[in-house]
Image: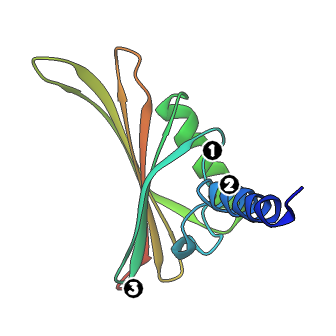
Amino acid sequence: MKIKPFIQFGVFLFLLCFVGGCADRMPYGFNGTVSRYPDSRIVNSMHLEGGCYAELETNDSWEKVLDYYKYHMSKKGWSVRVERESALFNSDDSETVAFLALFKDNTGLMIDTHTPVNGGKTQIALFMGDTDE
């Protein structure tokens, strides 16, 4: 039995599991302040000057998403300043759009959700960055 291919395969498998596990974590820029919504999938993320952005999707409603973030962020000392909901209609489809803005010290967190009325996945956009306050 050749041991070298076995070891190489083991290292490859370990790296694959490690990288795969990192894909489920919120981007570094959120510094553990904002949690990934439970049972959501991270679709996109990026680091921006003065902030960070993550896009997630879930099968849950926008109401559950906003309730989750209002509850968990208020426990960390964040306060809600803006909360809006509206329905958008176009010729092909309609969707519910909801927005939440939370603030703590000199940091703001904006949460924007879009849920197609026809039963599609809820899209969650999170942006956290410095404020001018």
Task: Tell which residue pokes out farthest to the top in this image.
Answer: 118
Q: Amino acid at mark 2?
A: His
Task: Tell which residue pokes out farthest to the right in this image.
Answer: 1
Number of numbered callouts drawn? 3
Q: Nearer the viewer, residue 39 or 7?
A: 7
Dot 3 surroundings within 10 Å: few (below 14), some, or many (20 or more)? few
Q: Are marks 1 and 2 in contact (CB under 8 Å)?
A: yes
Q: Nearer the viewer, residue 111 or 16?
A: 16
Residue carrying label 3: 133
Q: Are marks 3 and 2 in contact (CB under 8 Å)?
A: no
Mark seen at residue 72: 2
Dot 2 surroundings within 10 Å: few (below 14), some, or many (20 or more)? some
* Residue at the spot 12% in from the left edge and 23% down from the top edge: 90
Mark seen at residue 104: none
Q: Based on the displayed image, in which of its 4 quarters is residue 54 positioned?
A: bottom left
On screen, 20 above or below 109? above
Secondary structure found at label 1 = helix
* Residue at the spot 66% in from the left edge and 57% down from the top edge: 16
Secondary structure found at label 2 = helix
On screen, 123 above or below 96? below
